[in-house]
Image (cartoon, rainbow, N blue to C red):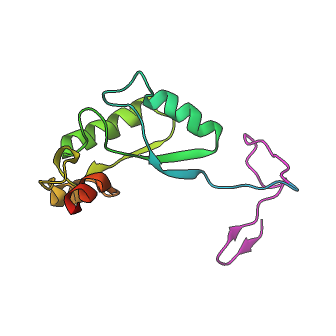
Amino acid sequence: MQYHPGIGKKVNKDNIPTKEKFINLKGKHIFPGLVDMRVFVGEPGYEYKENFRTLSNAALSGGVTSVVTMPNTDPIIDNISMVDFLKRRGRDKSKINIFPTASLTKNLEGNNMTEFGLLQKKVMKICLYIEIISIKMKKD
């Protein structure tokens, strides 16, 4: 087995473990799983439209292995307990990585901020959803 600094061990037919199957990928391309950064899923509240199970099946068929879900559900995702619930539910019901986002303001109204600091501390990877419509309405 050859070792290449910075790369590791070179793998070939002769040095793969016996329980593994060798697949010839000559002329093929391998890509990491794709991440969809803006997914509208019906869970919670609109499961009749789409749930985590149907979302993950559709995503996997297109090579998507992770999704970031938007907070416009019923109830609105605007607190830590909802984010925790959705992370657990996604882990239990889905075949892909689910990253729920939280709203920047309570109930997507654009008036009162959510517990932004607590959300940042609690959830390592979080995207905050800015209600563009609410902001535009305030400007007009």
Vertical arrangement, residue 64 with respect to residue 88, above or below: below
Q: Is residue 64 above or below residue 115?
A: above
Residue 11 picture location, percent across and down:
77, 60
From this viewpoint, which residue is outermost toward the right? 27
Q: Residue at x 19, y 58 (%)?
A: 138
Q: Is residue 109 left or right of residue 29?
A: left
Q: Which residues are magenta?
A: 1-25
Q: Horizontally, is 99 left or right of 67 in the view?
A: left
Determine the residue located farthest toward the bottom in the rendered image: 5
In this rendered view, identify the residue nearer to me: 18 or 74: 74
| Residue extending farthest top | 48
**Most extreme residue toward the front, as rendered?**
140
Image-quadrant location for residue 128: bottom left
Residue 54 inside the magenta-drawn segment: no
Expressed as whole percent of the image width and height from the top left, the position of residue 4 reads 72, 75
Q: Which residue is rendered at x = 45% and y = 28% of the image?
A: 50
Magenta stretch containing residue 15, yes or no? yes
Q: Main secondary structure of the magenta part?
A: loop
